[in-house]
Amino acid sequence: MAGSTQASRGKKRGGKSRRKDSSALMSWWPFLLGLVATPVAVHFASVMALAGPDALMTFYPYVLLLQSHLPGLTGNTAILSQWMMYLQFPLYGLIMTIVLKQKGFLAALGTVIVVHLVGVVGVIALHHGASL
């Protein structure tokens, strides 16, 4: 009888670890979504480029920041901006995953929105300062 009790306890532990593993994997859904969204976003960027730089600024602000030759960035910024085009949404997903584990969904979503808006405001400020 003692053997059957130990066997049933072992099964419970196995079930808990499987649930824990699947929940750990499920906590990475924002990062995985960012990876999946990247090819779609790159395609949208090629279509939005026809609408002008303002449309692209709202979608890929950090790409335009890197292309505008910020002080302190030397060398070929075209390569950096190309990398940023492919890394922006996975980085947003990574940020959201980290904040989601600590604070919750609304805080994670708000953080990613703020990070994106900081980039947009940076591009606007940079272009406004260049036109003066």
Image (tube, grey):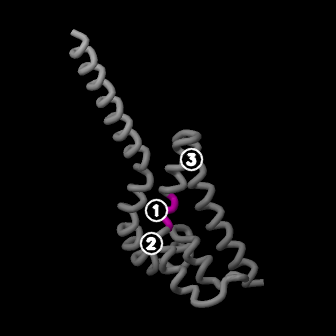
* CA–CA distance in space, label 3 to label 2: 22 Å
Q: What element carries label 2?
A: helix
The residue that appears at 51% across and 85% down in the rendered structure is: 79
Residue type beneath disc 1:
Pro
| Above or below for 32 versus 63 | above
Q: Which of marks 3 and 1 is nearer the N terminus?
A: 1
Q: The magenta stretch spans which residues?
A: 88-92
Point out the residue furthest to the right here.
132
Point out the residue furthest to the top here.
1
Residue type beneath disc 2:
Tyr
Residue where numbered disc 3 is placed: 99
Q: What element carries label 3?
A: helix
Residue where numbered disc 2 is placed: 86
How far across and how far down the image is residue 43, in percent?
37, 73
**Rendered-image quadrant of the N terminus:** top left
* CA–CA distance in space, label 2 to label 1: 8 Å
User: What's the magenta bit mostly, secondary-structure-wise?
Assistant: helix
Q: Do the residues labelled 3 and 1 touch (CB within 8 Å)?
A: no
Residue type beneath disc 3:
Val
Q: Nearer the viewer, residue 49 or 33?
A: 33
| Above or below for 105 versus 87 | above
**Rendered-image quadrant of the C terminus:** bottom right
How far across and how far down the image is residue 94, in percent?
50, 56
Q: Is mark 1 on a helix, strand or loop?
A: helix
> Label 3 crowding class (10 Å Cα cut-off): few <14, some 14-19, many 20+?
some
| Above or below for 60 versus 22 | below
On residue 90, which mark appears? 1
